[in-house]
Amino acid sequence: MALAIGYELPVREQSSAPLPSVFARALSQSFVAFQPIVSWADRRVFGFEALVRSRAGLLSGASELVGAAESLGSLFPLGRAVRGAVARAMPGAPDGSALFVNLHPHELLDPDLASPDAPLSRVAHRVVLELTERAAVARRAELRERIDVLRRLGFRVAIDDLGAGFSSLDLLADLRPDFVKLDMSLVRRIDRDDGRCRIVGHLLRLAHDLGARAVAEGVETPGERDALLSLGAPLLQGYLFGLPGPDLSAPSW
Ligand code: G
Ligand code: MN
């Protein structure tokens, strides 16, 4: 989820240890949690989003880990740890399900990502790489080129957080992703908000017209779920269906 205007940044946990050693510790205790993405119409698990976490007390959440990795220039080791963990978990995933993996744009420069021998590349056809524009490190042409290489390896691509400000419509035009993920700020209270309802309706048609499948994120209530279903949203994710957890198992319907 992206930060909306007016949202207060959480106060960073303080530590007297230098950031590199705090980060190294957090990385060594990192793991991946999985949150189900469901096709509600047929009560089926479509896939899971992999979300990095750490058992270390400091830098335990994804945004803290990624923030520290950004400032230390350590995005490659963090991304490799996540991709390795996802590859190891893949054999336990339900047949045919996809695993969605968040990618920081800078990771597109990591040769390991596009290496056919990397653990995740071997299961690329089961993986959807989620992208935002949070940090524009690569020029657009370069970004497209690198994504084309990944697609040739079999990876599919999603634009994450659409509607949150970080993911713009021109990225949608340029990348022609396989999936778009509608940000939870558009989903929240959609059952009681005509404006959100219309915007999401149009975004679903736009995604469909461009050949992308939409995933609505952050669904928390049956009311939000039912409003999304009546708008024709095929794939849903959120606390209503499952919290991020250690298991790749179906939610109880
Ligand atoms: O930016 P991205 O969409 O990848 O972020 C996913 C984040 O949203 C994760 O940290 C996850 O824990 C959180 N999340 C997942 N489902 C819900 C939900 O239903 N409500 C809220 N508030 N957060 C959620
Ligand atoms: Mn995501």
Image (cartoon, helix red, strand yellow):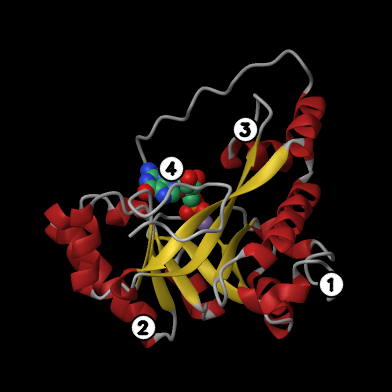
Instruction: Identify residue for label 3.
Output: 60
* 31 over 111 or under it: above or below: above
- Mark linked to residue 3: 4
* 58 over 120 or under it: above or below: above
Label 2 residue SS: helix
Residue flagged by tag 3: what amino acid is it? Answer: Ser
Q: How many marks?
A: 4
Residue 54 placement (x, y as % from top left):
66, 36
Asked whether the beta carbons under mark 2 and mark 4 sit within 8 Å of each other, the answer is no
Residue flagged by tag 2: what amino acid is it? Answer: His
Residue 59 in sight: yes
Asked whether the beta carbons under mark 1 and mark 3 sit within 8 Å of each other, the answer is no
Q: Which mark's residue is nearer the viewer, 2 or 4?
A: 2
Indicate if the residue with disc 4 has its beta carbon within 8 Å of ligand 1. Answer: no
Instruction: Identify residue for label 1.
Output: 115
Instruction: Identify residue for label 2.
Output: 208
Residue flagged by tag 4: what amino acid is it? Answer: Leu
The residue closer to the viewer here, 240 or 209, is 240
Residue 228 placement (x, y as % from top left):
24, 66
